[in-house]
């Protein structure tokens, strides 16, 4: 139906609407508290967006089965001018997106989500046989460890959910991933890092950013009855503790003899990893709720520094050496940390987090912290997992036998 106003043509109405839309911000920001209805709508809309972004980077004609994470790092591919997204990023991104969809409340009633997750699972299982997903480390920079950690996390979630076939079907793959992670710990000092000075065999500083989520995956494996080497876990936990500064910040890479408190090590430069480090230590009996709360306060206080680097080119930029890829990683683990606070505090902290997420939500209902459109799949998945945290099981504690 058209509304007729004397002297105002239909084309004039269209022109006015175009002008008004052009004034709208490129994001969906919340006014006031984010309601349960808004959260539910965001998860539903975001999950549909993720399903639609599944793609195929493998052989021509193969079904869309993966959600590759895209960063600046590439690996050489014979016969191609441009490098390929490394298999570790492809596996890690697919695992995170599959995990988010599996946890979405509407998963059981969505045939498209179920089919997409099954294809994602099959891609992950097949990709684990790739040479660059085997135990090892190539040269001085290798991201396969991200694939190992999040593939393990997702396969454990799939096994425990009962939504994706027999539990036994996952056991071999889970045992293989645990063994691979244990074999790829950094020699002598423990922990993990995607950037190592001497390759696979020489000692090198572990990354707190990578070690903490890898430990959480191992804790989850142990909780489901899989054997995990306690010495590997203890060395990695020691590396996290050694990286903590008196300010509450964590070094990016553990240099216990050289703590400057500047750049990477200043609190604004560390807030993207402080919650995940504190939660991981707490789960192993080496932390306190007060430290978790302090890490969250630091995250909220210095959130603006993370936002400055969101959707920017490059990686670590001064003064705090923050990279864009910290952004939604940080929000997911902040959401995890909130659920370990005393019950009376959680609601207010959740709203603080939701308000920040809504500040950067895009018009299509998704989220993205990179300049690459493809990385919207990962960012939206991490956000969905953050929103769903209150209704999910708490991360398993490490119980050494």
Image (cartoon, grey):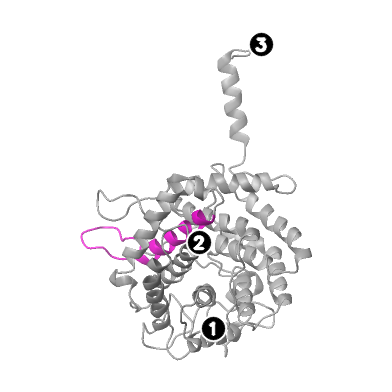
Left-right relation of 331 to 349:
left
Helix, strand or loop at label 1? It is loop
Q: Range of the magenta residues? A: 75-103
The C terminus - image quarter: bottom right
Q: Are marks 2 and 3 in contact (CB under 8 Å)?
A: no
Locate residue 13, reporting x and y percent.
60, 19
Query: Where does label 3 land, which residue?
Result: 5
* The label number, if any, that marks residue 98 in the structure image: none
Q: Which residue corresponds to mark 1?
A: 254
* Category of crowding for the residue at label 1, using alpha-carbon neighbours closer than 10 angstroms: few (below 14), some (14–19), many (at least 20): many
Q: Which residue is mark 2?
A: 161
Tell me where residue 158 appears, x and y as whole percent: 46, 62
- The answer, for residue 255, to whether it is visible in the render is no
Callout 3 crowding tier (Cα within 10 Å): few <14, some 14–19, many ≥20 = few
Write the residue at 57% across / 58% down: 385
Q: Residue at x 34, y 71 (%)?
A: 133
Gap between marks 1 and 2 measured at Cα: 36 Å
**Residue 140 seen in this snapshot:** yes
Q: Mark 1 to mark 3: distance in Å?
A: 70 Å
Question: From the viewer's perspective, is residue 274 above or below residue 109?
Answer: below
Q: Mark 1 or mark 2, which has the lower sequence index?
A: 2
Is 84 covered by the magenta stretch? yes
Q: Specify whether residue 254 is painted magenta.
A: no
Near-viewer residue (236 or 253): 236
Vertical arrangement, residue 196 with respect to residue 363, above or below: below
> For the residue labelled by badge 3, is the local secondary structure a helix, a strand or a loop?
loop
**Looking at the image, is mark 2 or mark 3 nearer the viewer?**
2
Crowd tier of the residue under label 2, counting other residues whose Cα lies within 10 Å: few below 14, some 14–19, many 20 or above: few
Which label lies toward us, 1 or 2? Answer: 2
Q: Earlier in the sequence, mark 2 or mark 3?
A: 3
């Amino acid at each position: 139906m058209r509304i007729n106003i004397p002297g105002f043509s239909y084309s004039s109405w269209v022109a006015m609407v175009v002008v008004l839309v052009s004034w709208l911000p490129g994001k969906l920001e919340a006014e006031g508290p984010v309601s349960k209805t808004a959260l539910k709508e965001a998860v539903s809309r975001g999950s549909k967006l993720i399903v639609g972004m599944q793609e195929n980077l493998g052989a021509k004609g193969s079904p869309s089965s993966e959600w590759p994470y895209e960063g600046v790092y590439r690996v050489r591919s014979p016969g191609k001018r441009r490098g390929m997204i490394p298999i570790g990023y492809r596996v890690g991104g697919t695992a995170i997106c599959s995990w988010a969809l599996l946890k979405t409340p509407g998963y059981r009633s969505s045939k498209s989500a179920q089919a997409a997750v099954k294809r994602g699972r099959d891609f992950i299982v097949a990709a684990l046989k790739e040479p660059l997903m085997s135990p090892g480390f190539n040269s001085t920079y290798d991201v396969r460890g991200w694939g190992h950690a999040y593939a393990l996390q997702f396969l454990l979630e799939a096994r425990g959910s009962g939504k994706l076939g027999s539990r036994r079907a996952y056991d071999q793959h889970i045992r293989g991933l645990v063994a691979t992670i244990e074999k790829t710990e950094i020699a002598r000092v423990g922990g993990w890092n995607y950037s190592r000075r001497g390759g696979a065999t020489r000692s090198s500083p572990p990354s707190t950013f990578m070690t903490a989520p890898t430990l959480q995956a191992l804790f989850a494996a142990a909780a489901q009855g899989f054997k995990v080497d306690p010495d590997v876990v203890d060395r990695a936990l020691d590396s996290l503790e050694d990286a903590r500064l008196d300010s509450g910040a964590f070094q990016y890479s553990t240099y216990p003899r050289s703590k400057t408190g500047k750049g990477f090590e200043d609190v604004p430069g560390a807030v993207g990893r402080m919650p995940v480090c504190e939660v991981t230590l707490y789960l192993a009996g080496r932390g306190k709720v007060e430290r978790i709360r302090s890490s969250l306060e630091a995250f909220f206080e210095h959130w603006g520094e993370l936002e400055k680097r969101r959707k920017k080119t490059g990686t670590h930029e001064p003064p705090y050496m923050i990279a864009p890829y910290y952004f939604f990683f940080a929000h997911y683990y902040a959401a995890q940390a909130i659920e370990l606070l005393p019950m009376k505090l959680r609601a207010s902290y959740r709203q603080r987090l939701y308000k920040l997420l809504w500040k950067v939500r895009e018009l299509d209902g998704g989220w993205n912290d990179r300049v690459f459109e493809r990385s919207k799949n990962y960012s939206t998945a991490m956000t969905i997992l953050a929103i769903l945290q209150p209704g999910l099981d708490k991360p398993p504690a490490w119980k050494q036998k």
